[in-house]
């Protein structure tokens, strides 16, 4: 494949791809027999984007889910329909769907209709089994029909099943995604090809699935989907303690979920980290609070005597709240922070209502981290945040809510810094960026216009072609 007249680092060049790699870059390359030729017309050619933190299957399932935080439920400003938890808009949204099979809802927050449990969900959906996921991703809420279908009473001693004062399930399941998926089985089919093609249209050539429940079986599932062409992108997986280097090229970090109200013992955590280190694995901590971040740092500090695998930078996922006193600790441990400023757009009004001014100033920091010498990778956290990387980059630059308010102006970055957050290597978010150069993998994103123009309208998607391993997977 030959790409003609593309801007590479601001200079017009021709680029040839062969056997999945960039084989030549020159001022004027002539096509060879039967070679596909793409005319770039002066558009910029950049490395394909890598989403450093997403949940692939959950995002694919979004196409058959009700978005409980959608505009049909929220007001035009993005705020909940009523301060006294008026449920009419949410009930109307559910009732518009065919009354057969399971109802799956996502992106729920208490500001919409209060603190749901099974009985309250029955008032919204009573004619079919329903499960609603809290926007944090921690909790699923089941209505009575769903609890009966899963025989939840027989599973009430399962850790994560919330019980009421009489010892009966309330319908709230904490961190039981893998169990729920296993119970539903074929009742919960997922078509991933639509999502993969959508991601290709954004210029995404790779992603890291950060689900803590990923196991050896998940790796096999991903490998089969990639082999069948259902997943176009280069998929990297982090997951549970069972993963090992034999898992293949998609093998990655040990994902450790930290919940401030239910932290593990530091000793137990150290055992897990040391076992992962023996396999050459990096560590990725889910941290959305200051306490969780301090706990992760303490755990890694306790294992500092072990030589870390150089191919894997340890990571703080989200880093939602990072105060100044933590900055030198992150820098000392050479941690990458994988952040999601896209949340500021759709959740900004609720952050403004629920957080103090001091907390807002330290929310999803970016520029401050870069200035402190800390590596920052950019990501979507889809399906919980916006998938489109160009929207996420725009949020990183503007930090605006739907209402147009700016949260944490000191952490606005330049378009170039935002783009760099998507161009670093999968196992080193925010590290040295990938490049368009001879010998590099031919995972490329050709823009419709020069970067100088694209940066002025960063929130729009201006991808002309996406190339993975030298093959066109998207053409505008």
Image: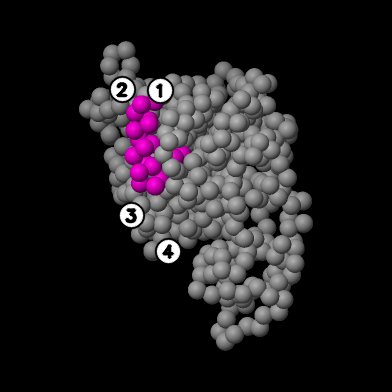
* Residue at which label 3 appears: 246
Disc 4 is placed on an element classified as: loop
In space, the residues marked 4 and 1 are separated at their CA atoms by: 40 Å
Q: Which numbered marker is on residue 248?
A: none
Q: Left or right: where does residue 409 sit relative to residue 290?
A: right
Q: Are marks 3 and 4 in contact (CB under 8 Å)?
A: no
In space, the residues marked 1 and 2 are separated at their CA atoms by: 19 Å
User: Which quadrant of the view contains residue 272?
Assistant: top left
Binning the other alpha carbons within 10 Å of mark 2 as few (below 14), some (14 to 19) or many (20 upward) gives many
Disc 3 is placed on an element classified as: helix
In space, the residues marked 3 and 4 are separated at their CA atoms by: 22 Å
Q: Left or right: where does residue 74 sit relative to residue 9?
A: left
Q: Position of residue 221 (x, y in %)?
A: 34, 54
Disc 1 is placed on an element classified as: helix
Q: Which numbered marker is on residue 262?
A: 1
Q: Residue at x 52, y 29 (%)?
A: 293
Q: Residue at x 74, y 70 (%)?
A: 12
Q: Position of residue 354 (x, y in %)?
A: 60, 21
Tell me which numbered mark, 1 or 2, is placed earlier along the sequence: 2
Q: Which numbered marker is on residue 169?
A: 2
Visible in this render: residue 241? Answer: yes
Tell me which numbered mark, 3 or 2, is placed earlier along the sequence: 2
- The label nearer to you, 1 versus 3, is 3
- The label nearer to you, 4 versus 1, is 1
* Residue at which label 4 appears: 229
Q: Main secondary structure of the magenta part?
A: helix
Visible in this render: residue 118? Answer: no
Binning the other alpha carbons within 10 Å of mark 3 as few (below 14), some (14 to 19) or many (20 upward) gives few
In space, the residues marked 2 and 4 are separated at their CA atoms by: 41 Å
């Amino acid at each position: 494949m030959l790409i003609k007249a593309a801007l590479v680092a601001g200079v017009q060049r021709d680029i040839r791809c062969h056997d999945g790699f960039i084989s030549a870059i020159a001022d004027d390359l002539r096509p060879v027999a039967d070679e596909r030729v793409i005319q770039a017309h002066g558009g910029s050619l950049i490395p394909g984007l890598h989403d450093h933190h997403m949940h692939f299957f959950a995002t694919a399932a979004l196409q058959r889910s009700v978005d409980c935080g959608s505009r049909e439920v929220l007001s035009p400003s993005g705020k909940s329909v009523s301060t006294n938890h008026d449920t009419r808009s949410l009930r109307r949204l559910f009732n518009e769907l065919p009354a057969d099979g399971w109802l799956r809802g996502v992106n729920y927050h208490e500001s919409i209709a209060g603190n749901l449990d099974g009985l309250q969900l029955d008032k919204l959906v009573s004619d079919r089994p329903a499960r609603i996921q809290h926007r944090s991703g921690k909790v699923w809420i089941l209505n009575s029909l769903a609890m009966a279908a899963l025989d939840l009473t027989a599973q009430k001693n399962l850790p994560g099943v919330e019980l009421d004062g009489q010892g009966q399930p309330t319908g709230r399941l904490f961190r039981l995604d893998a169990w729920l998926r296993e119970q539903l089985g074929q009742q919960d089919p997922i078509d991933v090809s639509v999502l993969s093609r959508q991601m290709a249209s954004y210029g995404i050539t790779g992603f890291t699935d950060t689900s803590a429940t990923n196991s050896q079986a998940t790796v096999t599932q991903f490998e089969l989907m990639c082999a069948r062409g259902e997943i176009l992108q280069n998929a990297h997986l982090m997951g549970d303690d069972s993963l090992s280097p034999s898992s293949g090229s998609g093998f990655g970090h040990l994902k450790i979920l930290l919940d401030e109200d239910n932290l593990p013992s530091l000793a137990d955590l150290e055992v897990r980290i040391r076992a992962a280190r023996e396999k050459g694995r990096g560590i990725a901590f889910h941290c959305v609070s200051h306490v969780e971040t301090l706990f992760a740092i303490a755990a890694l500090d306790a294992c500092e005597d072990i030589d870390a695998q150089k191919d894997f930078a340890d990571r703080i996922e989200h880093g939602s709240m990072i105060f100044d006193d933590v900055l030198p600790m992150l820098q000392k441990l050479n941690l990458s922070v994988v952040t999601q400023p896209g949340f500021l757009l759709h959740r900004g009004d609720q952050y403004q209502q629920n957080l103090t001014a001091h907390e807002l100033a330290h929310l999803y920091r970016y520029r401050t981290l870069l200035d402190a010498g800390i590596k920052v990778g950019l990501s979507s956290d889809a399906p919980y945040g916006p998938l489109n990387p160009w929207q996420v980059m725009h949020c990183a630059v503007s930090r605006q809510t739907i209402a147009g308010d700016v949260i944490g102006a000191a952490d606005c970055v330049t378009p170039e810094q935002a783009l760099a957050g998507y161009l670093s290597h999968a196992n080193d978010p925010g590290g040295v960026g990938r490049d368009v150069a001879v010998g590099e993998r031919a995972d490329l994103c050709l823009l419709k216009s020069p970067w100088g123009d694209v940066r002025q309208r960063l929130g729009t998607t201006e991808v002309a072609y996406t190339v993975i391993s030298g093959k066109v997977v998207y053409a505008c």
